[in-house]
Image: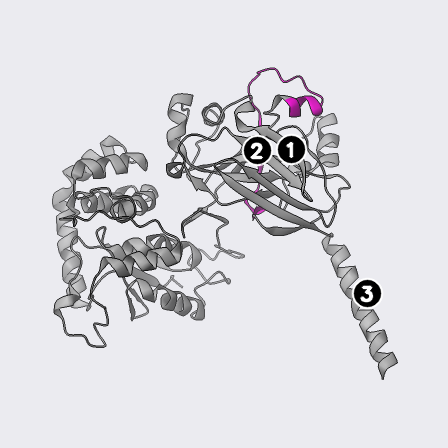
Amino acid sequence: MSLPKLKIVFNYRSPFCALVIDELFALQRRYRVDVEWVIVKDVPRPSSLPITEQNPRFPYNREDCERRARWRGIDWAPPKWRLTDVVAATHIGVWLLRNKPELFEAYTLRISRAYWSYGKNISDAAVVEELARETGVSDADTAAAKAAIPAAEIELADNAKWCEANGVLGVPFFIVDGLKFWGSDRVGDLKRYLSDAAYGPALAPVDSGILFNDATPVTLPVAGRETSVAVNRIFCVGRNYSEHAREMGFDPTREAPFFFMKPADALVRSGASISYPLATSRYEYEMELVVVLGQSVTNTTPEQAMKAVFGYAAGLDMTRRDLQLAAREKGRPWELGKAFENSAVVGPIKPVEDLAENPGGQIVLHVNGKVKQDAKVADMIWSVPEIIANLSQFYTLRPGDVIFTGTPAGVGPVVAGDKLHGEIADVGEVAAVIVPRLEEQALAAAKAKAENADWAGVLR
């Protein structure tokens, strides 16, 4: 059985598309649908049509869009002048969709909001090309897109005819199972329909016959935006602060950094209640600066590495220290001590574009209100660009990869009931509460149930 097709009609100039563009891309990850993007160069103009059930759109005005953006926490600051066209942006978008789909999302997110949120003149081809470059589109890709303009114009003309034939009155516009959802305010209705139709994360038949396929991504929110980042891999740097290296019994000489990894299901968002894990009696915190990548890089240099950084976050590398030390003494891998469920707590991502400079300020962790770790990010032995450059010698790093950059001195154990709160200057905060082991919670619940039953018997 093939997946149902969801057509999404959008335009790079539309403020209504810009308001929900992040949600549109989330649809293809959250629901089991085959998304077909229909790009239109000019927004269909329903304002000349009568106000009927087929055309419920209210008149376009900036105030309404600004109000909607404010509700969603999206930056919204378009200049007073109007866009004239988005031809260059559209041609590159069409080419990426057909030839470099792995870059299409990042490019489209950036271009769609460049004017409305940041006042960039995307009617200017040079501005569009620079924005494309920032999202990983090479100059060779841009040249190829320009060479393919005749083909793109044919596709755009066909899309315009299709819109006319299918009653597309404006963008964004969605068609699935013959049903039509029109406008940014109908995305919620579309989601409800997809959920009710069992197109969500529940097991669904697919052509390849894959079992146990929960396609729900592990995501982190972006601070100040409705956008989330789908996490790919979690890399961690060991002993990257001198004092921490000493407290772990090592000489902090400047030798090459070393890395270990955590599985994606280790990640949990800030604010979570975390059960004390299995098989350990020494569960410890490590407060760290987290780097989130937004571009692919391989074998890069420190000078070029920072172009791959999307943003930063505060994180907790939770560790079963007794298991880690036992493995280290025997020369074995660290997975049992480091790579387990809920061992990577991460706060909201602060995009680099919202930072005046790279993080280097105070990194502090409080446990039950008492300071346990207090240092500066600038004290790291290996800087962020050096870490990325070194790691890229061994892996092709991709958008959504997360890097924990090491912890300062002061690591220590926690017990059930402890409250952790960390913050990194200019980056953000991270918090977690430690709760009893799952089996202890089950025993407590059973005991409470039995006691309630005894009291019920007495009262009777």
Along the polypeptide, which appears first: circle 2 or circle 3?
2
Q: Position of residue 298 (x, y in %)?
A: 41, 28
Who is closer to the viewer here, 436 or 72? 72
In-image side of 430 versus 304 (left or right): right
Q: Position of residue 320 (x, y in %)?
A: 70, 39
Q: Residues within 10 Å of mark 3 (few under 14, many from 20)?
A: few
In-image side of 235 versus 297 (left or right): right
Q: CA distance from mark 3 to mark 1?
A: 38 Å
Q: Which residue sits at x=43%, y=31%?
A: 396
Who is closer to the viewer here, 168 or 379? 379
Specify the quadrant of the image occupied by residue 179: bottom left
Q: Secondary structure at mark 3?
A: helix
Query: Which disc, if any, is residue 447?
Result: 3
In-image side of 237 versus 100 (left or right): right
Q: Position of residue 357 (x, y in %)?
A: 41, 30
Q: Mark 1 highlights which residue?
A: 373
Give, as a three-letter code, the residue at label 1. Gln
Q: Mark 2 highlights which residue?
A: 363
